[in-house]
């Protein structure tokens, strides 16, 4: 039953006008339900320049639930040319795994 909610959660994550807290919660839920399948969706929003740094930090935290190569690449991209707070969030998540440290 929970898997049936994934399309609605993806929709919430991708809507830039949706409530940021709801978006972050939806991102976390997606990565708990099916991390490999949903990591690219969350990573894409994480890397959107137009999103707030606060939301992107929350998405970085959600991305820590997956060690998918897409996630590691997205977090590495988040280290360049972003606000310091976002760089610290991305680096913190990368530092949690040996694959992330190798990035």
Image (tube, rainbow, N blue to C red):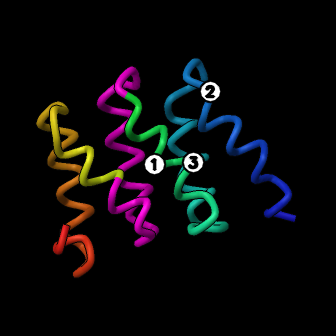
- The residue located at (58%, 18%) in the rendering is 17
Which secondary structure type mostly characterizes the magenta part of the structure? helix
- Residue at image mark 3: 41
* 52 falls in the magenta region: yes
Most foreground residue, 101 or 23: 101
Most foreground residue, 66 or 80: 80
* 70 falls in the magenta region: yes
**Image vertical order of residue 87 relative to residue 91, above or below:** above
Q: Mark 3, residues whose alpha carbon is within 10 Å: few (<14), some, or many (≥20)?
A: some
Residue 26 relative to residue 7: left or right: left
> Which mark is first along the chain, 2 or 3?
2
- Identify the image quadrant of residue 12: top right
- The residue located at (38%, 44%) in the rendering is 58
- Please name which of the two marks, 2 or 1, marks the residue nearer to the observer: 1
- In the rendered structure, are the residues bearing label 3 and label 2 in contact, judged by CB atoms less than 8 Å apart? no
Residue 7 relative to residue 14: left or right: right
Residue 40 relative to residue 62: left or right: right
> Which mark is first along the chain, 1 or 2?
2
Question: Percent from the top left, x then y, of residue 9?
Answer: 70, 45
- In the rendered structure, are the residues bearing label 1 and label 3 in contact, judged by CB atoms less than 8 Å apart? yes
Question: Percent from the top left, x then y, of residue 97?
Answer: 26, 77
Measure the C-alpha gap from mark 1 to mark 3: 5 Å
Determine the secondary structure under disc 2.
loop
Measure the C-alpha gap from mark 3 to mark 2: 12 Å
- Residue at image mark 1: 43
Question: Percent from the top left, x then y, of residue 87?
Answer: 17, 44
Identify the disc placed on residue 15: 2
**Image vertical order of residue 81 relative to residue 10, above or below:** above
């Amino acid at each position: 039953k929970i898997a049936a909610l994934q399309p609605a959660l993806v929709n919430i994550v991708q809507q830039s006008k949706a409530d940021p807290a709801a978006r972050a919660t939806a991102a976390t839920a997606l990565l708990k339900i099916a991390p490999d399948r949903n990591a690219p969706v969350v990573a894409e929003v994480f890397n959107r320049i137009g999103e707030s740094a606060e939301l992107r930090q929350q998405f970085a935290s959600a991305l820590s639930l997956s060690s998918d190569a897409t996630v590691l690449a997205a977090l590495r991209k988040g280290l360049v040319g972003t606000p310091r707070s976002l760089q610290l969030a991305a680096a913190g998540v990368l530092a949690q795994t040996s694959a992330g440290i190798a990035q």
